[in-house]
Image (cartoon, grey):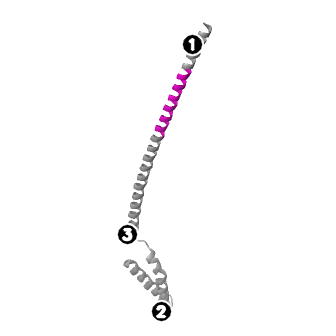
Amino acid sequence: MAVMAIAVMMDTLQISRRMRDAGATEPVAEAMAKTFAESTAFARDDVATKADLEALRLATKADLESLRIASKTDLETGLNTLRLEVKSDIAQLETRIQAGQNRLLVWIGGMLIATIGATVTLIKALG
């Protein structure tokens, strides 16, 4: 920043000289030079240096890396939770299917016994 201040001082001195050479009085030339220095003072504080930009780049890079790691962790956690939920749902479905198969077997067995009983009854009644 000190280098910029010197550059601005040199510019104001040059402005003052040029204005005097153009016929302005010394007080007017100095007032214009001061006005120029004051109007550019706020800009000097707002100018980013290469070092500022590099620090910002490194901070942004670090932030992005942290975000990538956090996102990856969140994604892995979500996938693991989803896997567990799917496994649980599959286990519940398998249990329900097995229960349905057992009920079906009992029903078929009952129908078979009823059919045999009806057949035996018909044979006795007819025979």
From the top left corner, tell me how far across and down residue 35 is, in percent: 49, 85
Q: Quadrant of residue 44?
A: bottom left
Local secondary structure at mark 3:
helix
| Residue drawn at point x = 52 percent, y = 26 percent | 106
Q: Residue 40 or 80: which is nearer the viewer?
A: 80
Three-letter code for the amino acid on which mark 3 is drawn: Ala
Local secondary structure at mark 1:
helix
Disc assigned to residue 15? none
Q: Which residue is mark 3?
A: 51
| Residue drawn at point x = 50 percent, y = 35 percent | 96
Three-letter code for the amino acid on which mark 1 is drawn: Val
Where's the N terminus, which quadrant?
bottom left
Q: Which residue is mark 1?
A: 120
98 in the magenta segment: yes
Q: Find the residue positioned furthest to the front.
A: 125
Local secondary structure at mark 2:
helix
The magenta-colored residue range is 89-111
| Secondary structure mainly formed by the magenta segment | helix
From the top left corner, tell me how far across and down residue 113 is, in percent: 54, 19
Left or right placement of residue 6 versus residue 111 in this view: left
Q: Find the residue positioned furthest to the right.
A: 126
Labels 2 & 3 near each other (Cβ < 8 A) = no
Spatial separation of the CA atoms under disc 2 and disc 3? 39 Å
Q: Earlier in the sequence, mark 1 or mark 3?
A: 3
Instruction: Mark 1: give few (<14), some (14-19) or many (20+) Cα within 10 Å.
Output: few
Disc assigned to residue 26? 2
